[in-house]
Image (cartoon, coloured by chain):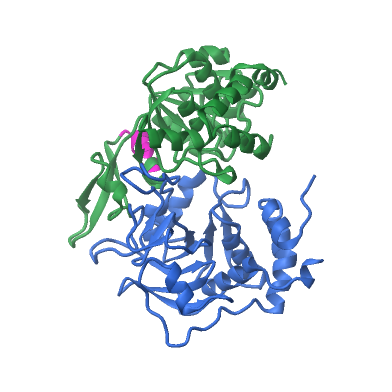
Chain colours: A blue, B green
């Protein structure tokens, strides 16, 4: 079966949902987006935005030449320190209801229970980027916890601490949450197909707000699907061969 | 400058040294890490600049390491670093967690010869709560409350990188990975492995000079062909994902790690890579 004959893949729906958040007119403009190696889905979302004709500069940190940096990651952090990176993606081994993220681990410091890889640049990027989209496919009480065991980077800061932004949203395999920094609280924006407020509450360790009627996360449009399955996949095939093979049936190179 | 041998480079790294290694996308010398395992180095304190990868997991597994200062340890697509995770669980190494720009900033303070530098962010992270050497101060040039982190200068005893080439003068070419130059400037000794030695002087070529670390900063180097393998080396060779995935599977257990080391560090496959 060719990809076009398949239904919408969950990864495609997530990419389209992320792309809508990137283009949200209420959010600060996304002129320059940096994408880490964490997940191919945020990368697909960024390529979808670019291939839709929006003038956005993408810096792909895991590619040898897909970014403007000649001084490695140091230059990314310097650029972000100046406020010249508009949007970044972060994940977390644990994420809590105040948008704190934990990339350290569980149990006693520094992760005597389960040790996660470490905080990378999160303790800086989360403060210095005007907005961050949190993305974690696994949506379970194990990941979305009442309170993270350790804070790699806090979701909100006291007013005297210099901070350009924080989480705009949290996108998971079950739903899209918006984050309100003034209240340090998530609210459910939409549920993916097959999910309901009750099913999401059951799988979420933290409390959140929800509207009386929860909208469904929209499917990608036909135009978006065509872009994802064509030019977006073309851009991603070299870096994410397994992802492109699994989601779009793109043959792996020999 | 006359090239040394790889084993002589490893012999010159004393037990207990603070050894800085770039991450898996920025020219780590995996060849030197393997030579340190063969030499039976002990008590090393590793610094990930700013994160750690394959070579760090190898050295931890081999019992060469007592402490790791880093912003993350990962094998990338192959997942968590298995020997690092096991050592944290067993409590056999000390981990000093950092965040990437703080490590860059500590090295930049060292290269400038100043005692500390400020860095935005980080306030409210538990990393800070576990770093008594990091301080939050009032911004001295602001009249309004503005707390800011200051981090101390950090001088690694030894930095180990794998460059594409050295010239007859001992200059090293690292292409666009110029953060290796900051590491070289900040470290007391830079040891490098290289793919090859070329005639002439890289600094005399305007096209190559900007990607060159001057011999001023280079203590010693040795030729080690494919010395970054399985990590990618600029446009010379790519990342060997199958090799790293094979390692990640094997190193899930202590026994599996030992067998892998016998084959790939001490044994026939190690010799073959060196000879290729």
Answer whether residue B105 is magenta in the image.
yes
Q: Is residue B147 above or below residue B35?
A: below
Q: Residue furthest bottom?
A: A212
Expressed as whole percent of the image width and height from the top left, the position of residue B120 reads 32, 53
Report if residue B232 is visible in the image.
no
Q: Main secondary structure of the magenta part?
A: helix
Expressed as whole percent of the image width and height from the top left, the position of residue B225 reads 66, 23
Q: Is residue A162 above or below residue B176?
A: below
Quadrant where the C terminus of chain B is found in the figure: top right
Give the residue displayed 55% in from the left and 32% down from the top. Answer: B251
Magenta segment range?
A: B104-113
Expressed as whole percent of the image width and height from the top left, the position of residue A109 reads 31, 44
Q: Is residue B40 shown left or right of residue A242?
A: left
Quadrant where the N terminus of chain B is found in the figure: top right
Give the residue displayed 59% in from the left and 62% down from the top. Answer: A41
Asked which quadrant contains residue A43, the reply is bottom right
- A159 and A174: which is toward the camera: A174
Asked which quadrant contains residue B247, the reply is top right
Give the residue displayed 36% in from the left and 20% down from the top. Answer: B16
Q: Is residue A122 shown left or right of residue B173?
A: left
Q: Is residue B146 shown left or right of residue B265?
A: left
Report if residue B217 is visible in the image.
yes
Expressed as whole percent of the image width and height from the top left, the position of residue A224 reads 68, 74
């Amino acid at each position: 079966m060719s990809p076009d004959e398949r239904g919408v893949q969950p990864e495609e729906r997530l990419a389209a949902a992320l792309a809508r958040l990137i283009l949200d007119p209420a959010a600060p403009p996304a002129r320059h987006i940096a994408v880490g190696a964490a997940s191919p889905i945020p990368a697909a979302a960024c390529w979808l935005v670019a291939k839709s004709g929006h003038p956005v500069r993408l810096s792909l940190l895991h590619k040898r030449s897909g970014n403007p940096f000649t001084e490695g990651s140091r230059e990314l952090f310097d650029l972000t320190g100046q406020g010249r990176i508009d949007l970044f993606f972060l994940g977390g081994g644990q994420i809590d209801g105040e948008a704190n993220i934990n990339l350290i681990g569980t149990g006693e410091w520094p992760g005597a229970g389960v040790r996660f890889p470490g905080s990378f640049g999160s303790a800086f990027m989360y403060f210095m980027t005007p907005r961050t989209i949190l993305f974690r496919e696994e949506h379970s009480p194990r990941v979305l916890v009442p309170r993270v065991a350790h804070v790699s980077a806090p979701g909100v800061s006291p007013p005297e601490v210099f901070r350009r932004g924080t989480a705009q949203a949290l996108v998971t395999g079950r739903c899209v949450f918006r984050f309100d920094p003034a209240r340090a609280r998530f609210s459910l924006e939409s549920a993916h197909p097959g999910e309901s407020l009750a099913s999401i509450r059951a799988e979420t360790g933290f409390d959140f707000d929800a509207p009386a009627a929860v909208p469904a996360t929209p499917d990608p449009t036909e135009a978006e699907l065509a872009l994802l399955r064509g030019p977006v996949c073309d851009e991603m095939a070299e870096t994410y061969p397994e992802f492109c093979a699994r989601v779009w049936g793109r043959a792996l190179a020999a | 400058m006359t090239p040394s041998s790889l084993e002589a480079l490893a012999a010159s790294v004393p037990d207990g040294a603070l050894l800085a290694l770039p991450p898996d996308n920025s020219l780590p010398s995996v060849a030197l890490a393997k030579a340190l395992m063969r030499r039976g180095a002990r008590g090393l304190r590793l610094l990930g600049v700013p994160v750690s990868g394959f070579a760090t997991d190898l050295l931890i597994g081999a019992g060469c390491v007592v402490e790791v200062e880093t912003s993350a340890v990962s094998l990338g697509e192959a997942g968590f670093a298995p020997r690092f995770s096991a050592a944290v669980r067993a409590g056999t190494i000390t981990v000093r967690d950092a965040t990437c720009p703080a490590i860059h900033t500590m090295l930049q303070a060292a290269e400038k010869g100043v005692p500390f530098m400020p860095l935005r962010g980080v306030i409210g992270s538990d990393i800070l709560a576990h770093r008594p050497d990091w301080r939050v101060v009032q911004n001295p040039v602001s009249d309004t409350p503005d707390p800011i982190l200051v981090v101390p200068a950090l001088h690694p005893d030894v930095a180990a990188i794998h460059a594409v080439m050295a010239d007859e003068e001992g200059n090293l070419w690292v292409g666009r990975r110029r953060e290796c130059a900051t590491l070289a400037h900040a470290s007391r000794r830079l040891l490098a492995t290289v793919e090859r030695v070329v005639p002439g002087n890289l600094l005399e070529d305007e096209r190559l000079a900007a990607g060159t670390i001057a011999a001023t900063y280079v203590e010693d180097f040795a030729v080690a062909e494919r010395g970054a393998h399985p990590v990618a080396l600029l446009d010379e060779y790519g990342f060997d994902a199958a090799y790293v995935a094979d390692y990640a599977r094997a190193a899930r257990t202590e026994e599996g790690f030992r067998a892998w080391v016998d084959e790939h560090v001490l044994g026939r496959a190690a010799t073959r890579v060196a000879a290729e």
